[in-house]
Image (cartoon, rainbow, N blue to C red):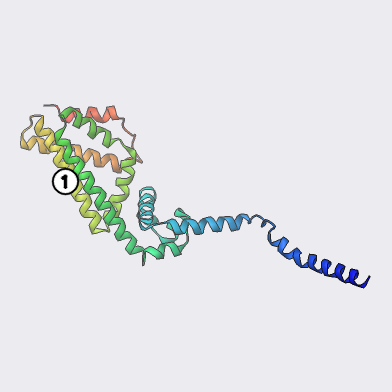
């Protein structure tokens, strides 16, 4: 009886000791929504690259203007903490420099695309120019970038270079239509200023259709 009781006590004690290990195999309770959100944010922060920040800043610029480019606002936009920003940049000015470099690169590609216009027929060239003028996405970006160019020399240089290349492309089109140097310059200038007027007057004036813009271009291209 004594041994039996002793064995019983040992078995019972062994069973009690085994219970904690059984508890360790029990599935964990689901995380709270707050904890899940924090985990997602940490993962997203880790994934954001230097280019993600520059692209995000340029997208925000196109929608809200240069005044929106603040660290706190960008963190809200991208859904991350300031730690992610400071991992890539020392301050907001360094980000602005990166944005200017990226925009200049984009504009250089646009300039190369415009150079290719000379290789296509005049009629098709006019259609492409009309389509560019009525593209509202183009207007929004142009308005924001031109505002920015007033305070950033690198962006200002890129805008001037693009404006000159647009003028040269339109003038070349007028020369190909048979106008002399003087008339080609006058008509090209008028067309470029129409484009700038569309950019800056988009919020207050009716938006022209592609057909209407084509009619204006055809009027300027008429002998």
Quadrant of the rendering where the N terminus is positioned: bottom right
The x, y position of residue 75, in whole percent, is 45, 58
According to the picture, the residue beneath numbered tag 1 turns out to be 164
In the image: residue 13, left or right of residue 202: right
Q: Secondary structure at mark 1?
A: helix
Q: Residue at x 28, y 39 (%)?
A: 198
Q: Residue at x 19, y 40 (%)?
A: 114
The x, y position of residue 139, in whole percent, is 31, 42
Quadrant of the rendered image containing residue 134: top left
Q: Residue at x 76, y 63 (%)?
A: 19
In the image: residue 163, left or right of residue 10: left
| 108 up-or-down from 133: above or below | below
The x, y position of residue 130, in whole percent, is 25, 33
Quadrant of the rendering where the C terminus is positioned: top left
Can the viewer see residue 189 in this picture? Answer: no
The x, y position of residue 123, in whole percent, is 18, 27
In the image: residue 121, left or right of residue 16: left
């Amino acid at each position: 009886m004594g041994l039996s009781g002793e064995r019983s006590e040992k078995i019972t004690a062994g069973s009690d000791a085994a219970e904690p290990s059984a508890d360790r195999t029990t599935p964990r309770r689901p995380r709270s929504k707050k904890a899940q959100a924090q985990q997602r944010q940490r993962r997203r922060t880790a994934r954001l690259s230097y280019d993600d920040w520059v692209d995000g800043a340029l997208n925000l610029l196109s929608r809200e203007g240069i005044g929106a480019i603040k660290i706190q606002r960008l963190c809200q936009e991208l859904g991350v903490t300031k730690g992610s920003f400071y991992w890539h940049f020392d301050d907001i000015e360094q980000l602005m420099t990166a944005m200017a470099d990226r925009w200049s690169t984009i504009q250089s590609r646009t300039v190369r695309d415009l150079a290719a216009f000379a290789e296509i027929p005049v009629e098709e060239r006019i259609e492409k120019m009309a389509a560019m003028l009525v593209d509202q996405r183009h207007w929004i970006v142009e308005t924001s970038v031109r505002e920015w160019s007033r305070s950033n020399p690198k962006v200002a240089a890129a805008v001037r270079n693009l404006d000159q290349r647009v003028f040269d492309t339109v003038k070349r089109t007028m020369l190909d239509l048979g106008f002399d140097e003087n008339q080609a310059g006058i008509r090209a200038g008028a067309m470029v200023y129409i484009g700038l007027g569309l950019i800056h007057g988009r919020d207050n004036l009716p938006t022209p259709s592609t057909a209407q813009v084509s009619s204006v271009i055809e009027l300027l291209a008429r002998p």
